[in-house]
Image (cartoon, rainbow, N blue to C red):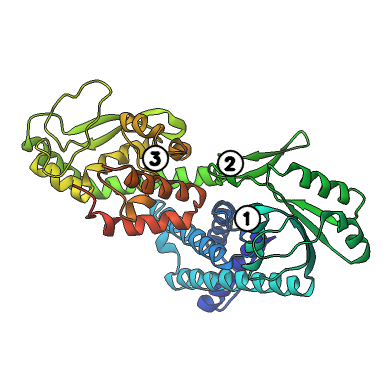
């Protein structure tokens, strides 16, 4: 429903912009084609940003950012298509600019109105809840309820074993309480090791007509992303999947290739100039190829400008460059400090092996070293490696000479995978030039 409403806003905005420019609401064939192209792109791009996921129903700003990013992408794709087909001159710039701005204002207004309606309907139909639980599992639910800005739930009573500062009633009184009070929902949050309490709660609820929800205690098994799906009628909980859907993966891959192609074309003079400097700095090839892990842990060969003198290391050994390292050439030091040595990886992006944004790929030897030292380390390979990433724009780039530095980088990589969005990718790309001369790079 949300996507259909957004498409309606875009359609009405287009007609309104046409009326403002030409004093008629009857679109000509050329403008009708532009409208249909915009609607088609929007019907694919806006849902692919994840803006209409149910999880964002109560988070208007995250939803709004994704919608704005999606509409910005649609606009850029329309401009690119017009330039490639050489039809831009056939359209009024005033009309196009008006369409873009009116649609943007309409989409923002629609999102805020939907959120306001959701909150008002929630307040008028507040759910009466009973919470059954114990220990940290119930404590987490209690804190989330306390921080719920919508105040959509009214906790009438608590049963089970005492948690935090909350007083609880004995589980044996649960059935009588439900019979004597009007309750809409019962939430059960019991720690996994407290199976007797869970059994008692479910036994007391077996004849109750209220809605019962069990909040599984998966905190101790937290890996990457917990998503509930169904197979053959059985609930299946994913512990190490990613929140990206198939359409989001395809959109990201398409944008990667488009962006890499444009950047390669624009940066070609710079690439040629750097190639000459690398060649002149010391004997050896201009491009350095190194085996690293891609998505799913598959080995890939990544390309970089060579920044060191040609040397040999024992098999299975990798020595990170350090300050004052005699192996680094004069131009290599500049390339590493500015991250310009990574530019050839645009070819890896075009080949589909890497993304513009994602966890930075580490040498295979470094992965083997940290695999047993850092929990969840290999989960960073649930996404394509990137030329830049969330860790890099937050200062965690360059040499990782301690476990603590690598742990912070991994935490940022996993946070990125869990919270991926088109808007987040655009933020990282925008921040990358400002982070290129970072303090952690050599």
Q: Label 3: few (<14), some or many (≥20) within 10 Å?
A: many
The answer to whether the residue labelled 3 contacts the one labelled 1, judged by CB atoms less than 8 Å apart, is no
State whether residue 12 is above or below residue 406: below
Percent coordinates x, y for residue 293 in the rendering: 38, 31
The disc, 2 or 3, on the residue closer to the chain's N-terminal end is 2
Task: Tell which of 196 and 43 is nearer to you.
Answer: 196
Tell me the residue that label 1 is attached to: 53
The answer to whether the residue labelled 1 contacts the one labelled 2, judged by CB atoms less than 8 Å apart, is no
Picture quarter with the N terminus: bottom right
Closer to the observer: label 1 or label 2?
2
Among the 4 quarters of the image, the one containing residue 329: top left
Left or right position of 297 against 387: right
Percent coordinates x, y for residue 242 in the rendering: 54, 43
Q: Secondary structure at mark 2?
A: helix
Left or right position of 346 against 437: right
Q: Is residue 42 visible?
A: yes
The disc, 1 or 2, on the residue closer to the chain's N-terminal end is 1
Percent coordinates x, y for residue 120 in the rendering: 72, 75
Q: Label 1: few (<14), some or many (≥20) within 10 Å?
A: few
Tell me the residue that label 2 is attached to: 221
Left or right position of 115 against 261: right
Disc marking residue 385: 3
Task: Tell which of 223 and 429 is nearer to you.
Answer: 223
Task: Tell which of 28 and 204 is nearer to you.
Answer: 204
Q: Secondary structure at mark 1?
A: loop
Q: Is residue 301 visible?
A: no
The answer to whether the residue labelled 2 contacts the one labelled 3, judged by CB atoms less than 8 Å apart, is no
Left or right position of 421 against 370: right
Among the 4 quarters of the image, the one containing residue 33: bottom right
Percent coordinates x, y for residue 383 in the rendering: 46, 40
């Amino acid at each position: 429903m949300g996507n259909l409403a957004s498409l309606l806003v875009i359609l009405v905005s287009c007609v309104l912009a046409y009326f403002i420019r030409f004093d008629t609401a009857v679109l000509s064939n050329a403008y009708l084609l532009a409208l249909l192209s915009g609607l088609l792109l929007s019907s694919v791009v806006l849902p692919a940003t994840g803006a209409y996921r149910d999880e964002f129903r109560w988070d208007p700003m995250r939803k709004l950012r994704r919608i704005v990013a999606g509409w910005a992408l649609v606009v850029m794709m329309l401009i690119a298509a017009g330039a490639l087909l050489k039809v831009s001159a056939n359209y009024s710039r005033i009309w196009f600019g008006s369409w873009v701005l009116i649609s943007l204002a309409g989409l923002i207004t629609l999102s805020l109105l939907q959120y306001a309606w959701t909150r008002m309907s929630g307040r008028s139909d507040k759910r009466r809840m009973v919470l059954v639980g114990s220990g940290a599992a119930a404590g987490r639910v209690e804190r989330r309820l306390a921080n719920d800005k919508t105040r959509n739930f009214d906790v009438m009573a608590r049963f089970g074993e005492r948690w935090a500062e909350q007083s609880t009633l004995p589980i044996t009184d649960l059935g009588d309480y439900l019979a004597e009070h009007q309750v809409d929902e019962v939430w059960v949050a019991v720690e996994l090791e407290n199976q007797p309490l869970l059994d008692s709660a479910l036994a007391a609820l077996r004849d109750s007509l209220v809605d019962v929800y069990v909040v599984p205690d998966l905190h101790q098994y937290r890996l990457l992303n917990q998503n509930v799906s169904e197979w053959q009628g059985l609930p299946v909980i994913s512990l190490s999947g990613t929140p990206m859907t198939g359409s989001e993966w395809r959109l990201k891959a398409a944008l990667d290739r488009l962006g890499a192609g444009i950047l390669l074309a624009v940066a070609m003079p710079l690439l040629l100039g750097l190639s000459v400097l690398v060649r002149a700095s010391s004997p050896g090839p201009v491009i350095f190829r190194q085996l690293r892990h891609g998505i799913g842990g598959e080995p890939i060969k990544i390309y970089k400008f060579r920044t060191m003198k040609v040397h040999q290391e024992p098999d299975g050994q990798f020595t990170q460059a350090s300050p004052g390292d005699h192996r680094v050439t004069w131009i290599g030091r500049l390339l590493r400090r500015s991250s310009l040595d990574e530019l050839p990886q645009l070819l890896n992006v075009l080949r589909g092996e890497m993304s513009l944004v994602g966890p930075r790929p580490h040498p295979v030897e470094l992965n083997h070293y940290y695999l047993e030292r850092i929990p969840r380390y290999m989960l960073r390979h649930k996404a394509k490696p990137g030329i830049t990433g969330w860790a890099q724009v937050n200062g965690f780039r360059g040499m990782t000479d301690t476990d603590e530095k690598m742990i912070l980088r991994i935490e940022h990589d996993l946070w990125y995978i869990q919270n991926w969005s088109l808007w987040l990718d655009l933020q990282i790309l925008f921040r990358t030039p400002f982070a290129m001369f970072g303090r952690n790079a050599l």
